[in-house]
Amino acid sequence: MKRRDLLAGSLASPLAAWTPAADAGPRPVDAGRQNDEKVLRYAFVAAETSFDPAVISDLYSRIVTAHVFEALYRYDYLARPSKVVPHAAAAMPETADDFRTWTIRVRPGIYFADDPAFDGKPRELVAADYVYAWKRFFDPALKSPNHIGFKEEGVLGLDALHDEALKTKRFDYDREVEGLRALDRYTLQFRLASPRPRFLYTLADSSLIGAVAREVVQRYGDRVGEHPVGTGAFRLVEWRRSSRLVLARNPTYRDVRYDGEPTDDDAHGQSILQRFRGKRLPLIDRVEISIVEESQPRWLSFLNGQFDLVSVPLEFANQAAPGGKLAPWLAKRGVTMERYAAADRTLFYFNMQDPVVGGMAPERVALRRAISLATDVQREIEVIRRGQAIVAQSVVCPGSWGYDPSYRSENGVYDVARAKALLDLYGWIDRDGDGWREQPDGKPFAIEYATTPDALSRQFDELWKKNLDSVGIRLTIKAAQWPEQLKAARAGQLMVWQLGYSAASPDVQDGLQLLYGLAAGGQNLSRFSDARYDDIYRRMQRLPDGPERLALLRESQKIATAYMPQKISVHRIATYLMQPRLLGYRPPLYGNQFWQYVDIDDGPGPSA
């Protein structure tokens, strides 16, 4: 999954002084805006949750934090395949002891955005800010959903610090630990318990481990998620929760120039580089984001010129890109398109602690596998997704290490007859003749499916009902807004929920964490726990890419398919449309950063 959150009002003003506007919908450029301001306007399809990197896990909040905070490294915006390059670091890291020791030099002369927390003084970024930001994931009081992911990196001493805080109810941020130290003002060193050949990918995630200033956290306390203050190219200046976000160019942002490394045969990347190389970043002044959950108003707003960028809603995919090609009527308007297989996966998970669908008893495993077999994913692709996806065989997504398009598993099979036979064999039968199956002990049951109250979700709800009707299982719907469902999911209060996860890096490990036992309630919403799977997860962390690691990956895929704690449905095909005024956009494969690399040109364009 990916993460972002934002702040409202001027960063120089207290939250109480922020005054929301009367309406929350998308709109043309504000009348009071300077005519020469360059503004990117687009929409999120779901609401943000918070802008504290330590406590977020959703994609939309993380898009924001990736532009406010800065990690030591980043993904080259133009490079395909992906490439990690220095960001706040002065150079690539020095590694030693079989990737157990990582030493990094922070670039001097980087400053945080101005904020009252700094008492009017410039605040330079130093190595200790990364030490503090990393420690926050281990503070039990924050209940970080990403704690286990960071725990598995094996930074020496942090587990002991966490365990001590559980006993004392106080996390000692001042206590030095062996594996995470600022050697001097600008030098940071990590010492890890085991080899971590791909630790660089973790260091490149600005949305989570961008530098955080301790003074900001101390000033705002529990409300620090409303006051993101980083060293990035943008700062939050307006926030109407679940409605509208505005970010503006950070006036204290250092002199960074456009550059990139597209391959020689990448004509599109080379043309973008030629146009913008050497220009100071960010190229635009503001970003205005509306939260528009319904597809139709989001699509119409783009067609009316109110949004510069849109991920084409599924309902309108055939209008926008029939046969995968940009529609001529849009091309005539100067609209351009980017279309590719996304590094993501959609899934529905079963709560393994639920008394009906959970557990490892044979009849519960049989129920989950039967529901998986009864799920008509191809119909979902053809009818709801309008062809904008491919059937998934496992959690390993396109672009991730270990992905094999020829790999096949029961996860990708649709077979209603087998599903019925499996249910019959394990005692899930209709005993009273009402058309619905009962549990093996004779008790009635229904699958409670969590969803969100929007038009597209209702289509998925109807298909879910049809799938379960086909095998005689009763379905009930539990609707709520997305942030509410996420909160309930983390608390283990949902039986079944469908959602999507975007890959955070080119590695497969973050996908495997979705079933890692220690990540239960965090990334592992299903709360699945299996000793062999967990052992594979840990061993893969230590191994370099190669045949031994690949063999373990294949075994983990088989375990997930056998117990079916989650059904991986599809890998989505992403289709983005851009107005002619939006220049230089290239969907980021990883890292979620693109605002600083795009430009806005309001000059005359093609006629409609």
Image (cartoon, helix red, strand yellow):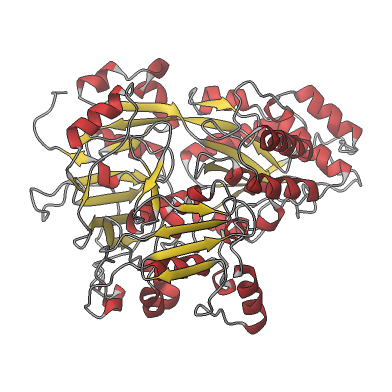
| Residue at point 90%, 38% (across, down) | 427
Q: Quadrant of the C terminus?
A: top left
Image location of residue 519, percent across then percent down: 65, 56
Is 37 displayed left or right of 387 in the figure? Answer: left
Residue 23 in view here: no
Residue 579 sits in which quadrant?
top left
Image location of residue 397, percent across then percent down: 56, 33
| Residue at point 62%, 37% (across, down) | 395
Is 487 displayed left or right of 330 in the figure? Answer: right
* Front-most of residues 62 and 425: 62
Image location of residue 518, percent across then percent down: 69, 57
| Residue at point 70%, 24% (across, down) | 414
Decide: is 139 above or below 75. Answer: below
Decide: is 118 above or below 435. Answer: below
Is 388 displayed left or right of 356 in the figure? Answer: left
Residue 589 sits in which quadrant?
top left
Image location of residue 386, percent across then percent down: 48, 24
Decide: is 322 above or below 124. Answer: above
Residue situated furthest front in the rendering: 97
Residue 17 sits in which quadrant?
bottom left
* Front-most of residues 109 and 266: 109
* Front-most of residues 419 and 342: 342
Is 295 displayed left or right of 405 in the figure? Answer: left
| Residue at point 9%, 53% (across, down) | 34
Residue 426 in view here: yes
